[in-house]
Amino acid sequence: MKPGNILRDRIRNLGLDAPRFKQTEDAVRWLGAVQSQDFGPAKWSIGERVKRATDATVDCAFQEGRILRTHILRPTWHFVLPEDIAWMLELTGPRVRAGNAFMDRTLGLDDDTLSEVHVIIRRSLAGGVHLTRKELAIAMTRGGEEPAGQLLGYIMMSAELAGLVCSGAMRGKQQTYALLEERAPGTQKLAPDEALAELTLRYFRSHGPATEKDFRWWSSLTLADIRRGLEMVAGDLEREVIDGTTYWFAPPVSARHKTAPRVHLLQGYDEYIVGYSESKHLLLPPLVPASPLATSSYNGVIILDGRVAGQWKRTIGAKCIAIEARLHTALGDEAMASFEDAVSRHGAFLGAEARGSIVGW
């Protein structure tokens, strides 16, 4: 297997070759969890993978609680299904909390303090109440706590990781919190080994070919746990050593026939980009003039045949969406046609005409 084939198989396994899922929750289930700290662009990550998806249909799934948003896997927000949230939190939450231990000590968030604050949060949200972070801060202040600065963020993250709260319904453009037990009643529980096997299989099935260290980054699990998980699901996976590194993936891999150039307009935190660590370098073409994954306002990433080709940004106007692209790689006629198709698909997702242009550095 060559690096180009690894990327081609990832494109397929991550559902980017063509929209394959019928509903928003189908895509989230397949991927396991979808990084979503930037809420609006994260909806596009789902939309690219779901047939006839629009920004409104993803909003509806979130509003109705068919997908939830919480801190899970790593110390950042992810979309996750109600049926998966409990066992994923039990498996990965302790690792994320351990990573937050230094900041918790710095902010004075010991177990007693967190226990008292969690009581206030539970009392404030009980009975199906959904409150914004600001409203919960007011409730904490009335209860004798002072959640100033970074403290409030870490308090709420601790409540999410403890399985106390998760996302509530949007209130206009404002995010809210709800009690997890009320937002996802009857959520599934798994035994520890069963949960480990399930998460391991989901990751390599949807993100593979990938390495143990890629999975460690994505899940926050230890290498010892990951190797135990791989032992449990080895019969469902294949592996191949490439340049001294072992890649795991679910069979069969995609057919490796030559296809027309394909352009994707990914948000900067799409799973294709953030789902890897050790093998993330495979995305980068040779001789890129600067780091192509983080530049100013051009925070979207243009992918051409699996590799980074530039960045993009969008400007939403009254009648049209303008998409500007900065390229590291020149586009031929076929690739340019694919770029224009990607622009049109993004416009269709947002329910408006979109026009693309190439701008210089």
Image (cartoon, rainbow, N blue to C red):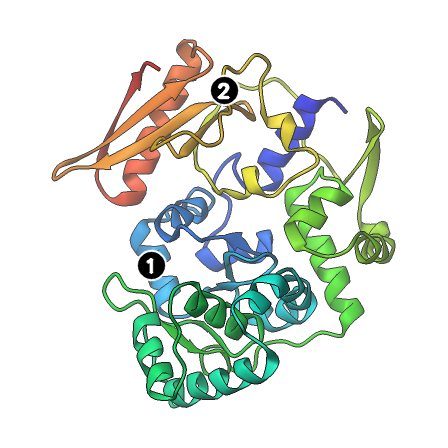
Q: Residue at x 42, y 12 (%)?
A: 331
Question: x, y percentage for residue 164?
Answer: 52, 79
Question: x, y percentage for residue 137?
Answer: 35, 76
| Front residue of 197 and 30 | 197
- Which image quadrant for residue 111? bottom right
Question: x, y percentage for residue 44?
Answer: 39, 45
Which badge, 1 or 2, is on the more N-terminal residue? 1
Name the residue carrying label 1: 59
Query: Is residue 66 visible in the rendered structure shown here?
Result: no
The number of callouts visible is 2
Query: Is residue 114 visible in the rendered structure shown here?
Result: yes
| Front residue of 322 and 74 | 74
Q: Is residue 160 above or below residue 304?
A: below
Kind of residue sitting beneath label 1: Asp
State the mark number for residue 16. none
Question: x, y percentage for residue 59?
Answer: 33, 59
Which secondary structure lies at badge 1? helix
Q: Residues within 10 Å of mark 1 (few under 14, many from 20)?
A: some
Q: Quadrant of the C terminus?
A: top left
| Front residue of 165 and 331 | 165
Name the residue carrying label 2: 290
Q: Quadrant of the N terminus?
A: top right
